Image: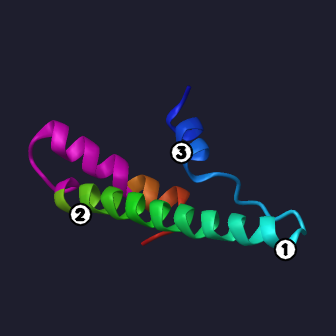
Amino acid sequence: MTVYDVVKKLIGEINPIGETNEDARRFENLEKMVILVDTLIGEIDKVAANNKNRQEYSLKKSGQFADKYLKDDLGIA
């Protein structure tokens, strides 16, 4: 089981299906997922900001990796 599988199991389905009561539950799940993703991106941003210009190889490597992900994959400058 992957981390993704665990998160999906904990949060639940997020895609609406056109049934009012179920979609209300799924919307709540979507809100939780957005909060989680925002928190995770914030953590990645901290790694980038705090380490991309460090002199120590391992710190700089992590910081630059995080920075590249944010810029290239997510389009966050």
Compare marks 3 and 1 and give the one earlier in the sequence.
3
- Mark 3 or mark 1: which is in front? 1
Q: Position of residue 73 (x, y in %)?
A: 54, 56
Of marks 1 and 2, the one in the foreground = 1
Residue visible at 53% across and 45% down?
Answer: 7
- The amino acid on which the numbered mark 2 sits, given as a three-letter code, is Ala
In three-dimensional space, the C-alpha distance between marks 1 and 2, rounded to whole angstroms, equals 43 Å
Q: Name the residue located 54 percent from the left edge and 30 percent from the top edge.
A: 2
* Residue 39 location, quadrant: bottom left
Q: Position of residue 48 (x, y in %)?
A: 28, 58
Q: CA distance from mark 3 to mark 1?
A: 24 Å
Q: Nearer the viewer, mark 2 or mark 3?
A: 3
Above/below status of 74 relative to 63: below
What type of secondary structure mainly makes up the magenta span? helix
Q: Residue at x 56, y 25 (%)?
A: 1
Q: Check residue 3 in the rendering and tell me which mark sits there, or answer none.
A: none
Q: Tell me the SS state at disc 1.
A: helix
Q: CA distance from mark 2 to mark 3?
A: 26 Å
Helix, strand or loop status at disc 2: helix
State the residue position of label 2.
49
Q: Which residue is mark 3?
A: 7
Task: Rate crowding at label 2 as few (under 14), some (14 to 19) or many (20 or more) other CA atoms within 10 Å.
Answer: some
Q: Is residue 22 left or right of residue 49?
A: right
> Callout 1: few (<14), some (14-19), or many (20+) C-alpha neighbours within 10 Å?
few
- Tell me which segment is drawn in magenta: 51-67
Q: Which residue is mark 1?
A: 20
In the rendered image, the residue lying farthest to the right is: 18
